[in-house]
Amino acid sequence: MSDMRDDVRELFRALTGREVDGLWSAPGRVNLIGEHTDYNGGFVLPFAIDRRTVAAVGVRDDDRIRVASTFAPDEPWIESSLPDLDAVRAAGDEGDWARYPLGIAWALGQDVAGPRGADLRAVPGVDILIDSTVPSGAGLSSSAAIECAVAVALNDLWRLGLDRPALAKAGQRSENDFVGAPTGILDQSASMLGRRDHAVFLDCRSLQVEIVPLGFEQAGLSVLVIDTGQAHEHANGDYRDRREACERGARELGVVALRDVGVGDLDRARSVLDDVTFRRVRHVVTEDARVLETVRLLREEGPRSIGAALDASHASMRDDFEITTPQLDLAVETARDAGALGARMTGGGFGGSAIALVPDELLSQVRVAVDGAFAEHGYGQPDAFVVRPSDGATREPDA
Ligand code: GAF
């Protein structure tokens, strides 16, 4: 991390001829359990990971916002004036990654941030250089990591005084209304609120948060991410389709959101809904119950007891919500057969990564088995790496 900080400081200097005013960083996330429950007012249990995005930021003496990144080194600065961000949003024509930092600046000027939101005609412009170790398209929320790193930076530099839940909300607003992806609050909450060795247990309706100890290290366990290399994105039709099915299910069952349907209501739901809608609803309802059960198990019996809940979550996403892929299913099955205590796809689905909870002594065995199975099926080699539950967004120490 300190190398990365030095590099990005130096590149900022080379690009602008001046020093940064500061570096801010935010992590990607793994969702331990609770998939597609956030926009249904339900429960999620993510943790922030030890892969981070750094934003090097310098305040300008005009109203321009310029963004550049180390992963698009050939692109010049992408820029706008702050008051013109509304027009940028409407045109929808900025480079893909640049919509995340521009969008968060826009969102901080909207009412989501409350009366203390930024007045984009009054705050100073900024140069923002992004660097990241969060792989993009891997289902690990590289976009939320950009949003959150830039959100904490602008919150400090513009002296907005917003708290972390408000900054997470601004991230979601940016994603929904600037980028155009109809996502929930899961990713930004994990990136903002994560804590080392802990998970973020979030009630997405009340936005109440509890920080739950994971105890993986003491239990000799690691979370292995298996990135299938199948990139995914949420602005496309599949994610939207699942969200619409949930909203239809809630409407037909006469509730505000699927959070209001219990496991005991599923028999009635089956008689009211068509088969596909019913299965989408069943996933969300049972997944909410699995999140609560996982939190209970972590508290009462420790992390070695949660494997079955992870497995059941994957089966529900595969059979009822239908958001897994053959590669994700293979990664999960193979990891489990090779000794993982539990495994599941993580994130929005249709590609991205699986996670496996693996006893430390079996890590290499699981990796070898997954590599072998992918080769046997003629799939490209997955990228498998261990992630550690880590702290959320922060200002980095000055050089
Ligand atoms: C993506 C979305 F961004 C989240 O809001 C959430 O819905 C998740 O998919 C599925 O649980 O990461």
Image (cartoon, rainbow, N blue to C red):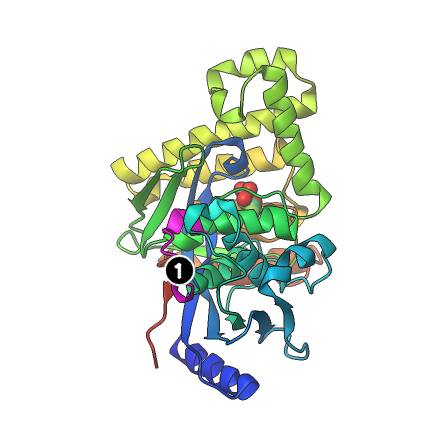
Q: Residue at x 50, y 20 (%)?
A: 261
Residue 52 in view in this figure: yes
Membership of 157 in magenta stretch:
yes
- Percent from the top left, x then y, of residue 158? 42, 63
Ligand 1 lies in quarter = top right
- Percent from the top left, x then y, of residue 361? 37, 59
Membership of 386 in magenta stretch:
no
Mark 1 lies on a secondary structure that is loop
Residue 337 in view in this figure: no
* Amino acid found under the numbered disc labelled 1: Ala
Packing grade of label 1 (10 A; few <14, some 14-19, many >=20) is many
* Residue 210 position by quadrant: top left
Which residue occupies the foreground of this view, 291 or 217? 291
- Percent from the top left, x then y, of residue 272? 64, 12
Which residue occupies the foreground of this view, 42 or 316? 42
Q: Residue at x 48, y 86 (%)?
A: 18
- Percent from the top left, x then y, of residue 276? 69, 25
Please report the bounds of the magenta region as a residue range: 156-167
* Residue 94 position by quadrant: bottom right
Is residue 17 positioned above or below 117 on the image? below
Quadrant holding the N terminus:
bottom left
